[in-house]
Image: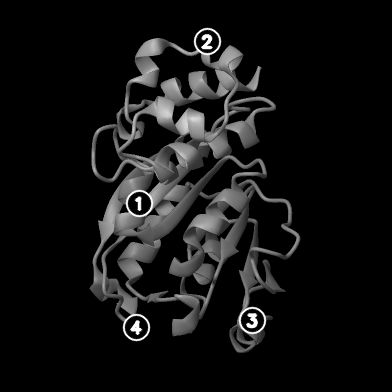
Amino acid sequence: MKKLGQHFLVDRRVLARICDYASLSEEDRVLEVGPGTGNLTRILSERAGKVFAIEVDPALATSLKGRFGNVVVIRGDALKVPLPDYNKIVSNLPYQISSKITFRLLKKPFDFAVLLYQREFAERMVALPGTKEYSRLTLNVSHRAEAEILEFVPRSAFRPMPQVESAIVRLRPREDPIPGEEKVFDDLTRALFSMRRKKVKRSLAAMKVPSEALSRVDPDLLEKRPQELSLEEVIDLAKAISV
């Protein structure tokens, strides 16, 4: 499982707290990505009405089938398989797919998610403008969802023990953040942070934004650098250049 970036959470207290944060009831249909040996799955099955567990490893998927009456094991790659209907997501995500799976999950409506990430990744998700952690990831997450770090988890809570600490993050999706302008926003943040030490006007020039669109942009924004921009300012930029 090392090649998949999976470290199994074994600390029972942390497992229980993750489920506490999810406020589960029998009405909940929960998605778990990367159930592994089923440590978290067991508690989810006790608290939720239905659990969908997506596991890419054939041996682990087979071992989980039939263990819990209300758990549906889906054998496959969570980045590719059709996603079931659920209202909450609770997972210890495989490190190597953290970014890709997060953005895939955010394309489908749900109430909220409680997810375990590498600490560094989590801190980038919630970073403030002007900090070294502030990045394209920060903006792409924050315009789609409200992210909050609930607690940090020590390396000793996992087997095998990872080299870094982890963090429990709660994500609450925003309602239709930028209607019809998702691609513009993504292209903009990519351009901005590929030239993060340059001023915004340089990034927009590299994008070949027409002068007419540039005239709609606040001149003060053009003089800023990407890491200085708030989410609202990037949204304003995206709207201005997409008209």
Around disc 4, counting alpha carbons within 10 Å, would you say few (fewer than 14), some (14 to 19), or many (20 or more)? some
Q: Nearer the viewer, mark 4 or mark 2?
A: 2
**Picture quarter containing residue 227?**
top left
Three-letter code, disc 3:
Ala
SS for callout 1: helix
Q: Position of residue 177 (x, y in %)?
A: 58, 27
The residue carrying mark 3 is 61
Q: Which residue is mark 1?
A: 122
Residue beneath the point at 32% across and 30% down: 225
Measure the C-alpha gap from mark 4 to mark 3: 19 Å
Q: Amino acid at mark 4?
A: Pro
User: SS for tag 3?
Assistant: helix
Comparing labels 2 and 1, the label whose residue is closer to the camera: 2
Q: Earlier in the sequence, mark 3 or mark 1?
A: 3
The image shows residue 151 at horizontal and vertical percentages of: 28, 52
Residue pointed to by mark 4: 160
Image height of 15 relative to 144, above or below: below
Q: Residues within 10 Å of mark 1 (few under 14, many from 20)?
A: many
Q: Residue 72 appears in which quarter of the rendering?
A: bottom right
Q: Secondary structure at mark 4?
A: loop
> Is disc 2 placed on a helix, strand or loop?
loop
Question: Cα distance, mark 2 to mark 1?
Answer: 36 Å
Which amino acid, mark 2?
Ser
Q: Which residue is mark 2?
A: 215
Give the alpha-carbon distance from disc 4 to disc 2, as whole Å: 55 Å
Q: Is residue 1 above or below residue 51?
A: below
Label 3 neighbour load within 10 Å: few <14, some 14-19, many 20+ = many
Q: Are marks 4 and 3 in contact (CB under 8 Å)?
A: no
Instruction: Work out whether mark 4 precedes mark 3 in sequence or the reverse, and give the earlier one.
Output: 3
113, 188: nearer the viewer: 188
Asked whether disc 3 touches disc 1, contact meaning CB atoms under 8 Å apart, the reply is no
